Amino acid sequence: MSGDVQELRVDLGDRAYPIYIGTGLIGEPAYLRKHIQGTQVLVVTNTTVAPLYLAPVVESLAGYEVQAVELPDGERYKTVEVWSEIFTRLLEARFGRRCTVIALGGGVVGDMAGFAAACYQRGVRFIQIPTTLLSQVDSSVGGKTGVNHPLGKNMVGAFYQPQCVIADTGSLATLDDRQLAAGIAEVIKYGLIDDPDFFTWLEQNMQRLKARDGAALAYAIERSCADKARVVAADEREAGRRALLNLGHTFGHAIETATGYGCWLHGEAVAAGLCMAARLSLRLGWLEETQARRIEELIQRAGLPVKPPQGMRPERFLELMAVDKKVLDGRLRLVLLKGLGQAVVTEEFDLQVLEKVLDEYGAS
Ligand code: NAD
Ligand code: GLY
């Protein structure tokens, strides 16, 4: 049985949904079953998560016609080809329009399962059970779903909101330290976007997070989800403000694509990207030296990279950044900082300063 459960809400009118956060939620039928319609349920998971958590989920679905598909594990399998295996299973099982797709796993599984739910028979119900820190604080909330293309990260996808998000913080016990740190990168991002008090809290509590203190993790997850839910509710389809959630990502996606998906974890690439955004903001005169240093120090204390991979040339960055989804009419837009907790989406920066910053990293 689960202990204290926090319930947040993503306020999207008739598509509003709850985020449940607590320990012991996987295998707890009460939260899951009330969001399922019909009798048919497909659980999408992967070969790592299935042996850990599939059985309790299936047990909690007693009485439903349950199928499961185990995808190969890894960012390099977040492809159209692997994604289509989900449809094969749905069709083989003769699942109809009233079926429900459940994503059980990290962000890769969540993004692929959500995109499949958006497309299968033009849209079926979808539930997120995120099992990594990164997916609990970010990817399971907000309805971005999709797969990668060899030429660009997350380039094929849809906005498609889940019925609910069930974040069992107990599942983080089996996550390795590197993956935990990757999730912390996205947590730091929220502090930098518009929550300076949270950034300060993170400075004071990073040791507790690294040591997996349950109360600290629960607080960080709740605050991150609340921060994200607020932004998504204001701008679901990224007409404006939601792009702030991409702080660090234009640099980060370029790193992921250049190094081959999976070599650098998404959160690691975002961490380096946050530092690069801070360094550019500093060079533009928008951020103070002490503020840029605080960002780098916090990211370092989280055990995350503060620089892009050695040998990644400025020209490669610029080439890959040009296919970013924030590019508007051929103009690169970036999320930069005008202070701690003051992110802006802007194309008003000197391209030469960006090139100089990329050169500095290339040379370091
Ligand atoms: P991931 O899904 O690859 O999971 C990381 C690893 O942890 C995998 O090997 C996975 O099998 C394993 N794992 C998952 N849960 C576990 C558990 N409880 N115990 C042990 N191992 C476990 O990576 P991720 O960091 O969760 O997600 C990254 C992905 O999310 C990227 O593809 C990124 O593009 C995407 N993303 C999407 C959004 C969005 O808004 N949709 C936001 C951020 C990131
Ligand atoms: N992770 C970026 C977004 O959800 O918009």
Image: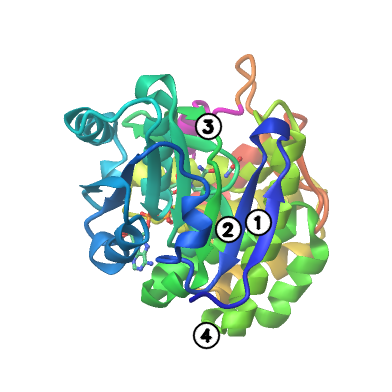
Q: Of the residues under marks 3 and 4, which one precedes in the sequence?
A: 3
Q: Pointer 2 and pointer 1: residues touching (CB < 8 Å)?
A: yes
Q: Label 4 to label 2, Cα distance in Å?
A: 18 Å
Three-letter residue code for mark 2: Val
Where is residue 356 shown, x and y percent of the image? Answer: 62, 43
Name the residue beneath numbered marker 4. 211
Three-letter residue code for mark 3: Tyr
- Does residue 95 lie above or below 228 as drawn? above
Where is residue 181 shown, x and y percent of the image? Answer: 49, 69
Q: Label 3 to label 4, Cα distance in Å?
A: 35 Å
> For mark 3, does the 10 Å Cα neighbourhood hold few (<14), some (14 to 19), or many (20 or more) residues?
many
Name the residue beneath numbered marker 3. 160
Name the residue beneath numbered marker 2. 137
In-front residue for pair 340/27: 27
Three-letter residue code for mark 1: Cys
Three-letter residue code for mark 4: Ala
